Amino acid sequence: MIDSRLITLRVFARCGTVGATAELTGYSPSAVSAQLRELQRALGMQLLTKDGRGVRLTATGRHLVAGSDSLVAAWESLRAAALEAGDQVQSHLGLGGFSTAAARLLAPLAATLRSTRPLLEVQVLEANPSRCFDLLVAERIDLAVIVAMQSDTHVEDDPRFEQTALLDDPLDVIVPSDHRLASRETVTLEELASEPWITEAAGSTYHSLFTAAFTAVGVTPRIAHEAVEWETQIAFVGAGLGVGLLPRLAPLHSAENVVRLRITGKGSPARRIVAAVRKGSITSPLIQESLGILQVNANRIVTARPEDDL
Amino acid sequence: MIDSRLITLRVFARCGTVGATAELTGYSPSAVSAQLRELQRALGMQLLTKDGRGVRLTATGRHLVAGSDSLVAAWESLRAAALEAGDQVQSHLGLGGFSTAAARLLAPLAATLRSTRPLLEVQVLEANPSRCFDLLVAERIDLAVIVAMQSDTHVEDDPRFEQTALLDDPLDVIVPSDHRLASRETVTLEELASEPWITEAAGSTYHSLFTAAFTAVGVTPRIAHEAVEWETQIAFVGAGLGVGLLPRLAPLHSAENVVRLRITGKGSPARRIVAAVRKGSITSPLIQESLGILQVNANRIVTARPEDDL
DNA sequence: GTAACGGTGCACAATTAGTGCATGATCGAT
DNA sequence: ATCGATCATGCACTAATTGTGCACCGTTAC
């Protein structure tokens, strides 16, 4: 209900270039350019200045964008209250989440919603956490599932978003099926201290989790190989190159020669997965229902017995 | 920046019928109907129900409209702040006021603004006070000049508007030029106690003012004739049918045989004229400037010597 | 200097939004 | 009951808005 051109300006304020704004909002660059020009004309304000080969917000523009946070939140809140009062839900819901979340949490959610509310249009977008926040601002999605702390900025106190914890996704150990511990159900990190480890490159969020886990038990692991995708890591492990940590949410698929083991002991690491929505929309009935479904599914996945893992 | 269809809904909430909404907003009835239908579709809410031959807001609709007050106010406030911060003004200004105010206050204001800010589009609408509030809600005008207390509802605590007093418009006495007191500069109401009075019909705001003035001095006037328009009243007085009270703002035009006299004494009546704007917009630079100009002009008119009157 | 990047103007296309009239439904009056 | 008045809405048509794709221009980096 807030003018779409103002939303576009807000996205621009986040990403700084017309091109990126176009990509995020789904418009063409010239459309974004025209929207911003038209917005300035309609408001009688100069919001942008040329800056090198790009454009930059003026002081007025920054003011407007900063103030629009509460406006957008107020609208979300109002919409949620009206929907709740009328016992109705919106007709469209956009969901966003990073790869494993999209696959294991959002896909089931979308399926459930599609069956319980046939005339609701659900759209799922896979996107990394940072992009999820962009998409929330751009109003392309209404709910995002992300890994806490994985976006650059502090989100907790951002006036644009609200978060609720969904689950702590524990990291399991994956070992080759012919590994000496492969028949165990649970292991401790200490038992694996001398193994060659496969992890992501230093600097990634996953890597921090990795080292934090070993620091907790006072062990320094030997990092043998690096992989970016879970699939790659699993393949490395399957090839006997070493062992690795895999979030419970990440499916093992049909990897025949790899076994997943639960970690016990005080070092048991986990990544916190949270749902984020635009501020004010948390009370929306459909958001509440979706969060509930996510919680149930998340708990089911985390507490599943090992043999149920894919 | 708030979606125009929501504005339309707000106007509908005020006046209750699609036709009246169309008239106020400047659309055709079918356009209003289509807008409201589209709004419901976009929000996924049922806002209206059939009610006899008309339509009526649902509970959801009332909720939405009530909550939208603060949303609109927040936007006005934000726009004002951004304009102020950027030392800029909007490109369009709509002014509304009742007949005499429009002629004596708004016309000069519009003229001043047109000369000082050539690229500002100014539009003036003559409308009675109640309609002025409708037009404010419909965003057809941004500033209204009205007679206080003359709209049915309590406006002081309405969350949609803010008011500032402009002037107390004193009532003068008009008498035929061959009247025994015609050469006087000032008179008291007591001196005119026995005159045949011309006033508006009982029940009108002007009539209440009229009786209040005489009550203050303990005199009961004899009401001989009734007129609705000032012009009519002036003509009656000119024809020697009696005397009347005329606001200082109301011009005497070229009435040759009528004289305007100031009233002295404790009974000197006045009507309070205030400017009203949408809540939040009071800090807008252009509104502030306009209010200043209105104040200056208003004071000049009220303090003008009698011979300067038209 | 040249290639890449980022933004904008323009012709054209697609979508949206508004008008005027006709229709239907309801209410009040004769 | 019937007729006319009042209100809303659907429909065909039209006007306006909005978006796209491409070309072009200024800026930056190599």
Image (cartoon, coloured by chain):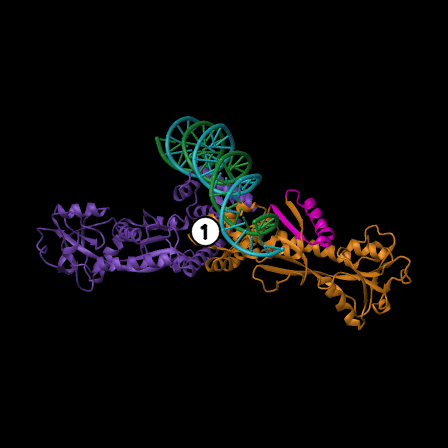
Chain colours: A orange, B purple, C green, D cyan
Q: Using the image, name the chain to which the residue with label 1 belongs.
A: A
User: Which residue is the extreme one toward the bottom?
Assistant: A218
Which residue is at a point 8% across and 54% down the rendered structure image?
B180
Left or right side of D29 for A222: right
Q: Is residue A86 magenta?
A: no
Residue picked out by circle 1: A40
B213 versus A254 height, above or below: below
Q: Position of residue A257 (x, y in %)?
A: 88, 54
Q: Give, as a single range, the part of the protein colored magenta.
A: A91-119
Left or right side of A238 for B161: left
Question: Given the image, on which type of amino acid does mark 1 rest?
Answer: Gln
Task: Confirm whether residue A162 shows in the render.
Answer: yes
From the viewer's side, name the closer residue of B76 and D11: B76
Q: Position of residue C8 (x, y in %)?
A: 49, 47
B14 versus B290 height, above or below: above
From the viewer's side, name the closer residue of A145 and B273: A145
From the viewer's side, name the closer residue of B86 and B21: B86
Left or right side of B192 for A28: right
